[in-house]
Structure formats: structure tokens, C-alpha cells
Amino acid sequence: MTRPARRSAHRLITLLSATLWLLSGAATAIAAERCEACEITLRASCGGFLEGPVVDQQGRIWLVDVTGGAIKRSDHAGHCEKVVDAPGGPNGLALAPDGRVFIASQGHGVMVYDPEQNTLRVVAGDYQGEPIKGANDLAFDAEGGLYVTVPQGDLFNPRGRVFYLPPGGGEPVQVASGLSYPNGIAVSADGQRILVAEMMMKRILAVPAVGKESPFNVTYVWARTAGGVGPDGIHLGADGRLYVANLERGELLVYSSDAMLEQTIPLPEQAGPVTTNVTSDGQHLFITESGKGEVWQLPLPAHSQ
């Protein structure tokens, strides 16, 4: 085969490979079911810019009001109340087994609220002498350690980081840096890795968890999203499925345990597009729509039970 012929063959193979890759991507997108008939109802209208929903043992939903600087709570009937002021821009929540509420604060790093003592204090405000600014979301591991995302910068200035607060206190450990707005976070069921929503890159990263030394445990792209601004809050279900709030798309993305997009769940038109976070009580999903300060709920999809 002559050199020009080899070049033509190489170009043809490259074109065919690219075409097959695009077609396979399109097929994957088409295969993902869009649930237009999901039974989504309004759970609560609390006002403010809501994020960080978590469900306590009594089935109440705790939330942060970012712009209002407060922690709120919604009961089973959908009634909302302000629990405590949290100045500095509260952005995410995580519930400890003992009932304490940990808060990712834009201005103060990580704080903790003790409902029994009605006290609020900073537990991690700096890293190597520099203030932690812009903390966004939180996730506990099985040992009681706490991961926190800090989404500084943007797509062209990726300065986002992920920290780990060891069980029992101590200095924060930097887990990852140079990320394009790391937002939602979850710990895998086996504790080997953490899933991080890198919003400005429209992808979910799998990052080795602290203390896990497996030679095959490396950082990789776990899944990608499409549309909207990107993945905001994420929630790992008991069945291993990952639920992703797709910001400015007004929808929830459902990924299988092996990172395949199974379903997209749009909120009703009246809900608005600012889907920020998602959590579950084991029977229902709860989604915050922050443009209107609302919480929407739906039964866990049948295939996820």
C-alpha cells in the first residue's frame, strides 16, 4: 500500500471510530428513560435559597437557606421553621449519628450545630494557616470522618479542593485540588472512594478515599452529565445508585451502580429549573428547587428499590 493510500485508510478508520463513538453515546442517551409520569409532589415551600437537605431519624428534613443565613427544618406535613441563624453563608449539611448537624459554611469552613445544647461553633476554619472559604457540601464516612468540598475558581481557573476532617478532630487533610468547582460529594458503599460532582466540567469523579491504599484505586471520571450548568448535589442510594441534581435543567439524573445513566426525572414545570440537591429517607427522594425555595418529593423509582 502506498503512503497516500495508508494515510487515506488511517483517516477512514479514524472517522469510522469517531462515528461509532458518537453513535454509541447517542444510543446511551436514548436508552436512558425520561420519566415524564413520575409522581412528583410539592413537599414544602420554605422560601430562601435552599440547599443541603438531609433527613433525620424522625423523618424531618433539615435544610440550609444560603441567602437567608439560616438552618431550616420541615416536618412531615411540610411546615417549615427556622431552627437557628447561621451567618456566613451556610451551603451544605450532614447529620452525625449523635444528632449533631454539621454545616459547610462559605465564610467559616465547617461548623457544627448541637440541637440539644442549641450551640453553633466552628470545627474547621482553616487549612495550614489559611481560612477555608467557600465550603459547599459534606459527606461522612463509616469511621466518622467528614469530607467537604470547597469550590473556588471556575472553569478557566480551577482552584477547587476537597478536604477530609479525621474522626475525633485534628487538622484537615487535603484530598484533591485543582478542580473546576467541586460541589456535591458522597462516599461509596465500600468506603474505597468518594464521588465528587465537578460541576463546571459536567462530570462525576471517583477519588480514592483517605487511607485506602489499593494500587488500583486511582482517580477517574466515573460519569458525565449533559445540559444545564452541571451536577450540583449528589446522593448515593442504599442500592448503589447515584442521584444527581442537574442544575438549571430542572431534573434529577439517576445512574446505576456501574455509572450508566438509567433515567432522567424532570420536575414539574411550575417547580423551576434550579435543582440543587437531593436526599432520601429510604422510601422517597427529596429534591430542592432553590429558585422558589421549595422541596419536591417522589417515591424511589421502582427499578431502584
Image (cartoon, rainbow, N blue to C red):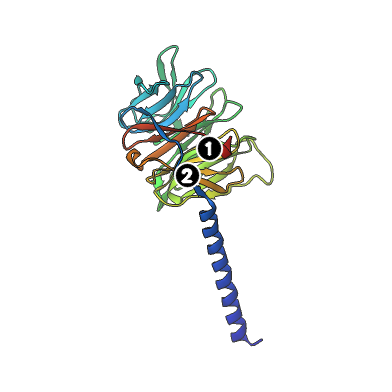
Q: Residue furthest top?
A: 117
Element type at mark 1: loop
Q: Taking 118 as reference, is 273 above or below it?
A: below
Image coordinates of residue 4 in percent, x first then y, are 59, 86
Q: CA distance from mark 2 to mark 1?
A: 9 Å
Amino acid type, label 1? Pro
Position of the C terminus, as image quadrant, is top right
Whether residue 157 is visible here, answered yes or no, is yes
Q: Which image quarter: residue 77?
A: top left
Q: Taking 202 as reference, is 168 above or below it?
A: above
Element type at mark 2: loop
Q: Residue furthest front?
A: 37
Q: Residue furthest right?
A: 215
- Circles 2 and 1 in contact, beta carbons < 8 Å: yes
- Quick one: label 2 or label 1, which is nearer the N terminus? 2
The residue identified by callout 2 is 35
The residue identified by callout 1 is 301
Q: What's the residue at 40%, 33% (across, down)?
A: 41
Q: Which mark is residue 251?
A: none
Counting every numbered tag in the picture gives: 2
Amino acid type, label 2? Cys
* Nearer the observer, 250 or 52: 250
Horizontal side of residue 56 vs 214, given as left or right: left
Q: What's the residue at 44%, 48% (across, down)?
A: 180
Q: Which image quarter: residue 272?
A: top left
Image coordinates of residue 86 in percent, x first then y, are 35, 24
Whether residue 93 is visible here, answered yes or no, is no
Position of the N terminus, as image quadrant, is bottom right
Crowd tier of the residue under label 2, counting other residues whose Cα lies within 10 Å: few below 14, some 14–19, many 20 or above: some
Image coordinates of residue 194 in percent, x first then y, are 57, 39
Image coordinates of residue 243 in percent, x first then y, are 51, 39
